[in-house]
Amino acid sequence: MKERDIQDYLFLHPEVLFPSGKITEKASEYSIQGKRIDLLFVVDGFRYIVEIKKVPIQREHIGQVVEYYGLMKTYMHDARLKMILVSPSIPEWRSAYLEELGIRCVEIGAVPSDLQEVNRIRKSTMSSQNREKEKQEIVGILDDGAGASFFDIAGPTTPRGMSFTRRMLQDTLVPIKSAYDSYDVIPFCITHSNSPHYYLEYNGAYGHGKNVLSHCGVWWAYRFGFSEEMKKNDVPNISIISNITGLDIIVNAELQPSQKALRQRIEKDLSAFDHLLQEHGGLWLKTYLKYEHQPRAYQWVLADLMAPGEFDGKTILSVQQKHGLDFSEERAFWLNRIIEENHELSEKQIAQLRDKNKTLNLAIRLVYPFKRDASIWSMDLKGQRSEIVEAVNKMKPLIDFFVR
């Protein structure tokens, strides 16, 4: 099927891409400053450019598409400009990256031959539009000029904290992808303000946190990989997670496959890992005991906290071994405390705590923290974005170590 056939079809049937919008203008083969636009539509006051690819979207296409979108915004001087990418195949992790930047992804491999295919495209389009609408409502809570305060972030989720999360994820993707240019970068983040997770973020020796269970705060993350068949979180990612002490930028081994990958990689080359720790110079070690109270929802207990220079690769391996030896005693102690203190748990959740959690689940985090006294909290959004991008990009040697 030729690219032009799909272009002609969408020009004649734009309602496939805009099932609920009012289309007031349309153009095919539109040209601006020497650049060709396959299709252009004005829908509900927004201008949409449609880029059609006749091949599946690969990693090398991502930069081209994002650059093209940026050029069109510049050439058209239109902040309300939107883009739709049409291709026979757009892998989920690549569409996640593009859609976070505001580029809607639509899979069309051939001119639709029946109503069922048309309805599939319309359904996909409406789902994408609903996600974007919800996102923009959240993003709009924060003014462009004002940044988030420490109190917007520290502790359970707030509307301003949710807005900060979506703004930062969206605004940091391109500069982070530029630094991690050999990887696919897959963004994901908190989607609901009522998190089912609970944290006990406390270490008395450091005067860190509070010795009480509280709801999880906001978070977002970047996953890095190469493979078309890449499994989710089977290697460490970079996560940005809030808690009552501030905002942590983390090389994160949270799920058990990534915990195992982190330990095996350190064990394989201790000296290289220790060198990377020293080169960075600002990373804390945090470990969390995880106890599941419903499927994929946990009680997170801060188990170990060590400052930069107080740990190395052997320390991480020995900490894992220690918690393995102490597993039964720690499990009994923490489950009793959680059940006694967390009055929000249902009987079903308490039963799951007791019936499950039969093996050690120890999240391992290498953390660069923005605490209450950090300068980031006095900055505007642009400054906060720069601080976060710098912190994430400084972790690239560690991602290379764990992922490659």
Image (tube, rainbow, N blue to C red):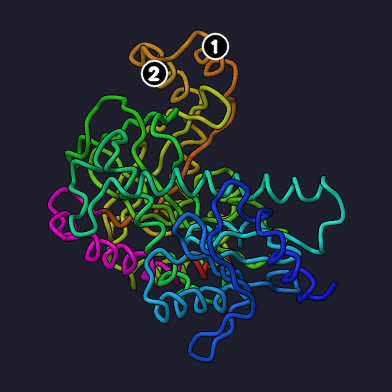
Q: Amino acid at mark 2?
A: Ile
Residue at horizontal 51 percent and vertical 73 percent from the top: 66
Counting the numbered discs, the total is 2
**Counting other residues with Cα less than 10 Å from the Cα at mark 1, is it few (<14), some (14-19), or many (20 or more)?**
few
Q: Which residues are magenta?
A: 370-398
Residue 270 lies left or right of residue 247; in this view the side is right
Inspect the image, locate mark 1, and give the three-letter code of the amino acid beneath it.
Lys
The residue under the point 35% across, 51% down is 285
Quick check: is 233 in the magenta stretch?
no
- Percent of width and height locating residue 8: 74, 70
Q: Which mark is residue 338?
A: 2
Q: In the visual, does 9 lie left or right of 319?
A: right
Q: Helix or strand or loop: what does disc 2 sit on? A: helix
In the image, taking residue 126 as reference, residue 376 lies left or right, namely: left
- At mark 1, the secondary structure is helix
Write the residue at 72% across / 64% down: 12
Q: Who's the residue at 71% across and 51% down the image?
A: 121
Whichever of labels 1 and 2 marks the residue nearer the N terminus, that label is: 2
Furthest residue to the bottom? 34
Q: Disc 1 versus disc 2: distance between alpha carbons? A: 14 Å
Q: For the residue carrying disc 2, how many other residues have a C-alpha within 10 Å: few (<14), some (14-19), or many (20+)? A: many
For residue 348, the mark is 1
Residue 96, image x, y percentages? 56, 56
The answer, for residue 165, to whether it is visible in the render is: yes
